């Protein structure tokens, strides 16, 4: 277990270095002088020379990259060109809003996905079966930005149950979370159904049944427990999609989160901010997957043995 | 993903399992489907016919075909131009003249939806094609090449996968600037690992087969083995992953459009139309409902077809979750 941990940690480190290299090169991939790209069209020659010196752009690339990584590890992601604010501070202000939305969507999609998936695996009712087979397909085909607009129209404008825009605490989290959770709940529902059907056919479940364990106990205690493992993996893999999806959903509901920060920064060509948001989200995503891998092996003893 | 969305069912988890297979020996070959089911003749053909006679699959195929025809002949199908501004018909409700109504600038929503479908299909197919052109050779090399090459390519793909797909797309648009072609590049870059990893795991399994070993013993060159013996075996799982991911690519492109980072005005784009409609949800429902329905129907038809293909080739069971 320990050696496996170190092996994976080493791989994690390589990926993090690669991620930082990719975000570092992002600014250098912009055609022309990065200093010019940073400052925009109105920059004077003096400004450009100053920025080049300040950012160390006059030094060789490997040295620049080393500095970038050392600073990033210390929490220094540069300053926003548009506002002059440290990037890490700008991200800090918006981070919680995005994380709450992502977590709420994970919670919602896991609950509904599991429920739908279990019913789908167990039910023998034709109507239920039809609904269940349609739900994941529609969930995966509906763009979050349209379902978001539909939710705003119905619950915000027609019924007036919830505030439709901004971030005013828990109540304004409901609609964006539903919109964001829908595709993921479809994925979870499919996964749950497949694994439940597979485990229900396995021998230990048959044995439990033969011993006279009541049906609902067989389903919820024996089969569901085994079916949960792949669901954990799917949910953790969906974390990245949700984090990315949150960017779009934030835009629909005008929530001040990371996504809106990134989009505003792109439109203003504020590169340090874009770079910072991309780096931070990738690092969070990689760490979540790393953690999930261990949760996965803790849930399934077979994995750590191999 | 689309991430998001971009990354739908087989999207994110198929490649991840491909990665997991790097450490586990003998991955289940993705094309084993037909052989598993028994020795009888043209099973795939029969399975294809059976699947597409099911209502869902037939509906998907029919819808997709209809939408492609509509998109191809969009200019001939209705009388308005998608960019013409009708000053005396601002936000007109659906009528005989404007079937889907007009938007805040007095442009025909029907014309814009039809041309928007065109944009979506173009970006969807172009980005998937580009991702295939890059991903398939990478996957073949990783699956057939030596350990070091494999390890190198895998690291590269892992780094690519570390970025949530829509974020990677956003980063690329930040560098290249918004636009139709840049949307294609952005989506292709974020989906290359999906194809590369699928091809890699299939190639690895196929390379162990007797007919490949026999070809090598007979002195066939590596290039010949890759092109003649391995590439065809890779096609069935790819076909499934591709159909499902065109839908995801269409969603991703529309998402970028919604954010203002996709195809730029005046190009009619469904995501952009929805973001324009956001301010008029109450006054002009038709501005958001029709573009939304168009994207959903397009992606749904692609998902239905992908699902049916997935059942035929049994891809999800073998190369996906185990």
Image (cartoon, grey):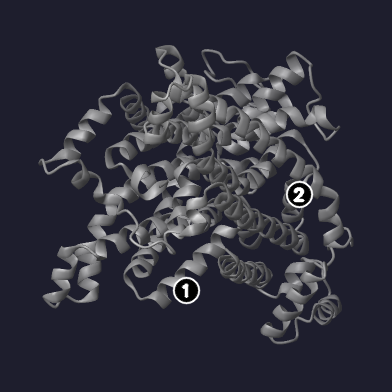
Spot the residue most to the right.
A84
Image check: A57 left or right of A4?
right
Q: Please provide percent x and percent y for residue A295.
A: 61, 50
Do we see residue A200 in this rendering? no
Identify the residue position indicated by label 2 in the image. A258
Q: Chain of mark 2?
A: A
Q: How many marks?
A: 2
Number of residues whose C-alpha sits closer than 10 Å to that of mark 2, classed few (under 14), some (14–19) or many (20 or more): many
Q: Quick check: A54 above or below B6? A: below
Cα–Cα gap, marks 2 and 1? 32 Å
The percent coordinates of residue A222 (x first, y second) are: 50, 32
Relative to A62, is B180 on the left or the right?
left
The residue under the point 73% across, 74% down is A69
Of A6 and A92, the residue lying toward us: A6
Q: Residues within 10 Å of mark 1 (few under 14, many from 20)?
A: few
Q: Secondary structure at mark 1?
A: helix
Q: Quadrant of residue B245?
A: top left
Q: Quadrant of residue B138?
A: bottom left
**Left or right of B48, for residue A87:** right
Q: Image point 82% across, 71% down: which residue?
A: A74
Front position in the image: A82 or A103: A103
- Which residue appears at 80% of the width and 29% of the height? A172
Which mark is drawn over residue A98? Answer: none
Residue toward you, B193 or A191: A191
Q: Position of residue B165 (x, y in %)?
A: 57, 52
The chain letter for the residue carrying disc 1 is B
- Label 1 sits on residue: B152
């Amino acid at each position: 277990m320990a050696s496996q941990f170190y092996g994976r940690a080493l791989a994690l480190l390589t990926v993090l270095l690669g991620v930082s290299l990719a975000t570092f090169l992002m600014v250098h991939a912009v055609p022309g002088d990065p200093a010019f790209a940073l400052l925009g069209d109105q920059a004077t020659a003096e400004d450009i020379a100053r920025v080049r010196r300040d950012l160390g752009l006059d030094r060789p690339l490997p040295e620049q990259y080393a500095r970038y990584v050392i600073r990033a590890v210390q929490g220094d992601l540069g300053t926003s060109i548009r506002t002059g604010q440290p990037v890490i501070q700008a991200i800090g202000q918006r981070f919680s809003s995005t994380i709450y939305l992502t977590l709420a969507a994970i919670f919602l999609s896991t609950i509904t996905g599991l429920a739908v998936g279990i019913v789908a695996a167990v039910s023998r009712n034709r109507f239920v079966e039809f609904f269940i087979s349609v739900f994941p397909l529609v969930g995966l085909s509906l763009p979050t930005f349209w379902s978001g607009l539909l939710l705003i129209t119905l619950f915000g404008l027609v019924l007036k149950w919830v505030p439709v825009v901004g971030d005013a605490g828990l109540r304004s989290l409901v609609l964006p979370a539903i919109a964001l959770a829908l595709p993921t709940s479809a994925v979870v529902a499919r996964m749950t159904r497949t694994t439940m059907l597979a485990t229900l056919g396995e021998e230990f479940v048959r044995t439990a049944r033969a011993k006279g364990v009541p049906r609902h106990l067989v389903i919820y205690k024996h089969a569901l427990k085994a079916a949960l493992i792949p669901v954990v993996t799917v949910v953790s893999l969906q974390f990245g999609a949700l984090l990315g999806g949150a960017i779009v959903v934030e835009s629909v509901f005008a929530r001040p989160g990371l996504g809106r920060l990134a989009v505003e920064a792109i439109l203003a060509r504020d590169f340090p901010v874009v770079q910072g948001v991309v780096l931070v989200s990738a690092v969070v995503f990689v760490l979540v997957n790393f953690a999930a891998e261990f949760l996965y092996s803790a849930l399934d003893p077979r994995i750590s043995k191999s | 993903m689309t991430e998001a969305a971009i990354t739908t069912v087989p999207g994110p988890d198929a490649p991840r399992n491909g990665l997991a297979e790097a450490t586990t020996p003998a991955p289940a070959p993705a094309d084993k489907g037909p052989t598993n089911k028994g020795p009888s003749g043209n099973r795939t053909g029969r399975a294809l016919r059976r699947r597409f006679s099911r209502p869902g699959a037939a509906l998907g195929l029919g819808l997709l075909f209809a939408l492609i025809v509509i998109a191809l002949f969009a200019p001939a199908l209705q009388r308005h131009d998608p960019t013409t501004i009708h000053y005396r018909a601002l936000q007109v409700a659906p009528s005989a003249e404007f079937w889907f109504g007009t938007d805040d600038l007095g442009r025909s929503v029907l014309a814009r939806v039809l041309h928007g479908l065109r944009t979506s299909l173009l970006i969807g197919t172009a980005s998937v094609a580009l991702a295939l052109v890059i991903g398939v050779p990478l996957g073949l090399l990783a699956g057939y090449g030596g350990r070091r090459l494999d390890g190198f390519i895998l690291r590269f793909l892992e780094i690519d996968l570390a970025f949530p797909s829509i974020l990677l797309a956003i980063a690329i648009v930040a560098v290249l600037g918004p636009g139709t072609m840049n949307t294609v590049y952005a989506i292709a870059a974020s989906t290359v690992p999906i194809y590369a990893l699928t091809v890699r795991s299939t190639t690895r399994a196929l390379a162990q087969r007797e007919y490949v070993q026999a070809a090598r013993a007979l002195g066939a060159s590596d290039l010949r083995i890759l092109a003649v013996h391995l590439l065809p075996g890779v096609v069935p799982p790819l076909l499934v992953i591709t159909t499902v991911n065109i839908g995801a690519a269409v969603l991703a492109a529309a998402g970028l459009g919604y954010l203002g980072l996709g195809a730029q005005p005046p190009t009619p784009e469904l995501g952009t139309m929805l973001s324009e409609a956001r301010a008029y949800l109450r006054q002009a429902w038709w501005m958001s409902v029709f573009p939304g329905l168009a994207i959903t129907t397009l992606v749904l038809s692609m998902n239905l077809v992908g699902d049916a293909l997935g059942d035929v080739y049994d891809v999800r069971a073998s190369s996906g979750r185990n």
